[in-house]
Image (cartoon, helix red, strand yellow):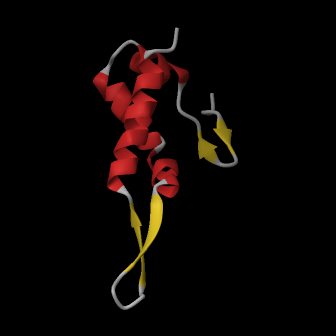
Amino acid sequence: MKNPNYKGIELLPLSVIEAARAGDAEAVERVLRYYEGYINKLCTRTLYDEYGQPHVCVDEYMKRRLEIKLISSIVTIP
């Protein structure tokens, strides 16, 4: 059986989500890796140096906050 996908991207298996809800650290890490690109996109900021040159970077503080929010929402689902 083929793995389900959405617009060519393989979806996260339900078994991984259930294992993450049960507290499996490896499954939680797999969920975080799955959403890493989306989280990085949300946390991308443009900073300017003293010469006015733009630098695009990932706000690590915001990234960690979003990862913690994702983990807490996985674990606290009733």
The answer to whether 76 appears left or right of 3 in the picture is left
Q: Quadrant of the N terminus?
A: top right
**x, y (%) of residue 69?**
43, 32
The answer to whether 5 appears left or right of 12 in the picture is right
Say which residue appears at 34% left-offset and 16% top-offset.
23
Q: Residue reaching furthest top? A: 78
Say which residue appears at 54% left-offset and 21% top-offset.
14
The answer to whether 56 appears left or right of 60 in the picture is right
**x, y (%) of residue 3?**
60, 33
The answer to whether 18 appears left or right of 1 in the picture is left
Q: Is residue 21 above or below residue 52?
A: above
The answer to which of 44 and 27 lies nearer the viewer is: 44
Say which residue appears at 47% left-offset and 61% top-offset.
44
**x, y (%) of residue 40?**
45, 54
**x, y (%) of residue 55?**
40, 77
Q: How many marks?
A: 0
